[in-house]
């Protein structure tokens, strides 16, 4: 069986199991399986595979047909400008979250030094991306998951900035460590109703505690806001991602806790996806 035949077979299996991205996934998984670039495979479609290569590829296809995210099968995901190790203990980084990184860098374009806290650091994609862009910034990463922190540490080491980040296992409720210029977070914000409707590729594979934000999805967000007013410096910024339809409620919580909303960021679907708020009280 050659590359062309096996890709067609993989694609057929994925389509039969309602994988929308069947074509590209079939090609990508062969690339991963053979440790060859996708381009090289497409330029050599008549190359023959050995039996053990076919078996390895089909095993990956069988994982994907159950809607396991490609990032978990591959073990990494590209975010901002960097590749991050990804596993079942952390969320897969989303393109929408890059908007938060971009806006923060725009706001602090002239800031040479900043003390940053990332609440619920996960893979570390937000904090590490910021610190890679700003050589004199320092960060603290907190998460309630020991395994998530382990993943973030690995990614920080890969990007050679582990000496600029403190990793602490902690809930935001019990965190009074320092005063920060900037607090960032992509918190759990999926409501109970939304969680039950999630695609199986998300609900069955990505960590629930990184997704589920309580009955209305606001519970963790509110905790972060309330604690941030004590650990942010005066005039400091809180930048966080929020869920669909949460902008009004979250805005009210921010205002009640002494924050002024400096910027609302819309995602690619024109949804109010991120809020940046300044501490004024």
Image (cartoon, helix red, strand yellow):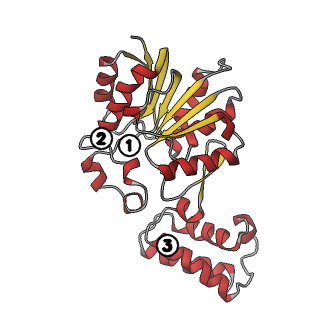
Is 133 on the left-hand or right-hand side of 141?
right
Asked which quadrant contains residue 105, the reply is top right
Residue 52: percent from left, percent from top: 66, 86
Q: Which residue is mark 2?
A: 217
The residue tagged with tag 2: helix, strand or loop? loop
Q: Earlier in the sequence, mark 2 or mark 1?
A: 1
* Image marks 3 and 1: residues in contact by CB distance under 8 Å: no
Residue 133 higher or lower than 63, as above or below: above
Image quarter where the C terminus lies is top left
Q: Earlier in the sequence, mark 3 or mark 1?
A: 3
Residue 276: percent from left, percent from top: 46, 24
* Image marks 2 and 3: residues in contact by CB distance under 8 Å: no
Q: Which residue is mark 1?
A: 188
Q: CA distance from mark 2 to mark 1?
A: 7 Å
Q: Which residue is mark 3?
A: 63
Name the front one of labels 3 and 1: 1
* Image marks 2 and 1: residues in contact by CB distance under 8 Å: yes
């Amino acid at each position: 069986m050659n590359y062309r035949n096996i890709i067609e077979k993989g694609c057929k299996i994925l389509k039969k199991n309602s994988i929308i991205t069947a074509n590209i996934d079939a090609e990508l998984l062969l690339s991963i399986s053979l440790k060859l670039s996708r381009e090289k495979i497409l330029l050599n479609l008549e190359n023959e595979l050995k039996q053990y290569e076919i078996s390895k590829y089909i095993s990956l296809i069988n994982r994907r047909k159950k809607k396991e995210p490609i990032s978990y099968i591959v073990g990494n995901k590209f975010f901002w400008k960097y590749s991050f190790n990804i596993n079942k203990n952390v969320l897969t980084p989303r393109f929408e979250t890059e908007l938060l990184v971009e806006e923060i860098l725009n706001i602090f374009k002239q800031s040479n030094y900043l003390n940053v806290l990332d609440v619920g650091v996960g893979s570390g994609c937000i904090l590490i991306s910021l610190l890679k862009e700003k050589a004199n910034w320092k960060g603290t990463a907190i998460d309630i998951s020991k395994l998530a922190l382990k993943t973030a540490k690995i990614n920080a080491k890969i990007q050679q900035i582990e000496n600029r980040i403190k990793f602490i296992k902690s809930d935001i409720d019990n965190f009074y460590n320092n005063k920060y210029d900037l607090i960032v977070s992509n918190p759990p914000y999926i409501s109970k109703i939304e969680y039950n409707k999630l695609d199986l590729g998300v609900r069955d594979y990505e960590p629930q505690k990184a997704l589920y934000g309580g009955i209305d999805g606001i519970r963790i967000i509110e905790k972060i806001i309330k604690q941030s007013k004590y650990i942010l410096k005066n005039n400091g910024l809180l930048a966080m991602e929020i869920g669909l339809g949460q902008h009004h409620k979250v805005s009210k919580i921010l205002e009640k806790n002494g924050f002024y909303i400096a910027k609302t960021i819309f995602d690619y679907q024109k949804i109010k996806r991120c809020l940046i708020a300044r501490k004024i009280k």
